[in-house]
């Protein structure tokens, strides 16, 4: 016997998928798991891709936090009436971060299967 723990959202996804295929949740889960196990190269590639996406999202989040911190420091300096000579560099970093997020998003959209 193999037991699986799912979050409420994961369980609902499983129930919805099983219903859409006119299968029991257990039957659907077994079928999907065996299909994944029968093509380990493809399954490993999907898992690796998901891990890469998650890792890049964490890197982007960390980068945005750093840029946001710099932007807050510039705003604090300017609000105090002081000069902030680094404002140009910080705004450039904001633009680079935005372009990086746009590029990442576009790569994800481009990698999605097309439906017609």
Image (spheres, grey):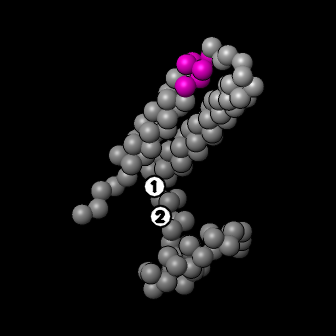
Farthest residue toward the top? 85
Q: Is residue 90 magenta?
A: yes
Farthest residue toward the right? 80
Residue at point 44% right, 50% down? 42
73 or 81: nearer the viewer: 81
Up/down of 81 relative to 43, above or below: above
Residue at point 54% right, 48% down? 50
Secondary structure beneath label 1? loop
From the image, give the main secondary structure of the stretch colored magenta. Answer: helix
Q: Quadrant of residue 76?
A: top right
Question: Which disc is residue 39 wearing?
Answer: 1
**Range of residues picked out in magenta:** 86-91
Residue that mark 2 sits on: 35
Q: Please indicate whether residue 115 sits to the left or right of residue 36 in the image.
A: left
Up/down of 73 relative to 53, above or below: above
Question: Where in the figure is residue 60, as x and y percent of width and height?
Answer: 58, 36
**Can see residue 66?**
no
**Distance between mark 2 and mark 1 Cα atoms:** 7 Å
């Amino acid at each position: 016997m193999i037991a699986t723990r799912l979050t409420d959202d994961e369980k609902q996804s499983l129930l919805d998928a099983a219903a859409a295929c006119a299968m029991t949740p257990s039957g659907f889960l077994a079928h999907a798991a065996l299909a994944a196990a029968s093509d380990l190269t493809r399954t490993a590639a999907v898992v690796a891709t998901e891990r890469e996406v998650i890792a890049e999202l964490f890197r982007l989040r960390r980068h945005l936090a750093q840029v946001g911190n710099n932007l807050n420091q510039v705003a604090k300096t300017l609000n105090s009436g002081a000069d902030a000579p680094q404002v140009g560099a910080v705004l450039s970093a904001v633009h680079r971060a935005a372009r990086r997020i746009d590029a990442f998003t576009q790569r994800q959209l481009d990698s999605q299967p097309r439906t017609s």
